[in-house]
Image (cartoon, rainbow, N blue to C red):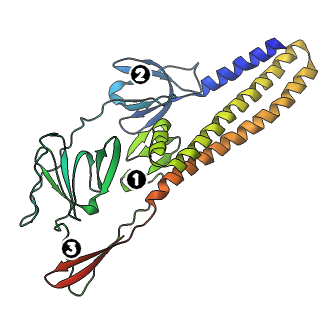
Amino acid sequence: MNKNLLLCALLCLVSIIAYAQDIIITIDAKKIEAKIMEVSKSEIKYKEPDNLDGPMFILEVDEINSIIYSTGKVVLYNQPAQSITPPIEQPVQNSAVPIQQNNLANPNLSTILLLSGEKKLVEVIDMNNNYVSYLEGIERKNIPAAQIHTVTLPNGQVKTYNKENPSSPSLSQTQTQVQTQIQTTTVGNDSSSKKAGRIYRDNKNYLYNDMYISSKEVERILMRENGAAYNKWKQAKGMLIGGSVCTGLGTGLVIGGLFSLLSDDNIICISLESAALIPLGIGLGLTLGSSAYFNKAIDIYNSKYDNVAVQLRWGVTANGVGLAIAF
């Protein structure tokens, strides 16, 4: 009987280890589920995770964007240099806002001038037509392009987002300007329409600010920014681990029952097979439930981006007093 229990435990361990798999993302955004067998400077050798006895596949390093290992570790390849070289634009003519000079203490800082008149001296890490990302300590933050007047980079280049002078909205005498920007995004749409800061689930992967990240990175983001979402994520992890243990135990009992047939002991075989139904059923329920909890954690985190804020701005122009409503 002790030998049967030992055999069941070993089979559970093998089944859990064999389930782990790696993900290779190529430079053309193709995802390959694989089991990495060998890594060298020029190529990656891997096998299909559900056919480890099958053929070995070889992929050149030049074709790989990143590898997400089953442990959560992410290795990047062929990444572009971390430099920002947006097109040079001339500063707004007759503007009352001078170009901010570089900070001599830190030459990597850029100056972001908001339409509200506020200036931010920060380290910019990403710029596009929708938002500007910068570091505040170790936290990444985004500013929508609709709120930015200009960005002055460390090399003196100026990127103009809105030609309207800060704190001086241009309103006609008989018309109130209402600017409404609504972004509705579902998983699977083109990444250019995705809202910055949100986390999207793409099959078994996660997308954050147009980049694929591992579940470990998702957990760190939730822990840092949303306690309720992080607690729900931990519950989901506990359910997944419990489901894996129960499934492994049930599988071990099934295999143990099959081995008992070798000794023509039908009673033990029936007992083990019957007992296996309980942990297998529990394991299946916990595994399915954990998926719903993972999605709920992401929904809780993303809920802060679904709130619509309304701002009323007064402005005085040559034609009189105007009111701007911003959503």
Residue found farthest to the bottom: 174
Q: Which mark is residue 169?
A: 3
How far apart in space, not on screen, are marks 3 and 2 (Cα)?
Answer: 56 Å
> Where on the picture, by quarter, is residue 50?
top right
Nearest the camera: 3 or 108? 108
Q: Amino acid at mark 2?
A: Ile
**Residue farthest along the left direction in this orientation:** 94
User: Among all residues in the image, which is located at the extreme front?
Assistant: 105
User: Label 3 sits on what residue type?
Assistant: Pro
Q: Nearer the viewer, mark 1 or mark 3?
A: 3
Structural distance between the alpha carbons of marks 1 and 3: 33 Å
As helix, strand or loop, the secondary structure at mark 2 comes to strand
Query: Residue visible at 86% across and 17% down?
Result: 260
Which badge, 1 or 2, comes first in the chain's sequence?
2
In x, y percent, where is residue 247? 72, 31
Q: Quadrant of the C terminus?
A: bottom left
Say which residue appears at 49% left-offset and 52% top-offset: 301
- Of 260 and 17, nearer the camera is 17
Q: Label 3's element? A: loop
Please tell me whether residue 106 is drawn above or below residue 317 in the rendered image.
Answer: above
Q: Amino acid at mark 1?
A: Asp
Is 139 situated left or right of 170 in this image?
right
Res 107 quadrant in image: top left
Q: Name the residue tied to disc 1.
A: 190
Q: Which residue is mark 2?
A: 44
Residue 30, image x and y in percent?
42, 38
Real-space CA distance between mark 1 and mark 2, rounded to the nearest whole angstrom: 29 Å
Q: Are the residues tagged 3 and 2 within 8 Å (C-beta)?
A: no
Q: Earlier in the sequence, mark 3 or mark 2?
A: 2
Residue 278 is situated, as x and y percent measured from the top left of the image, at: 81, 35
Q: Quadrant of residue 257?
A: top right
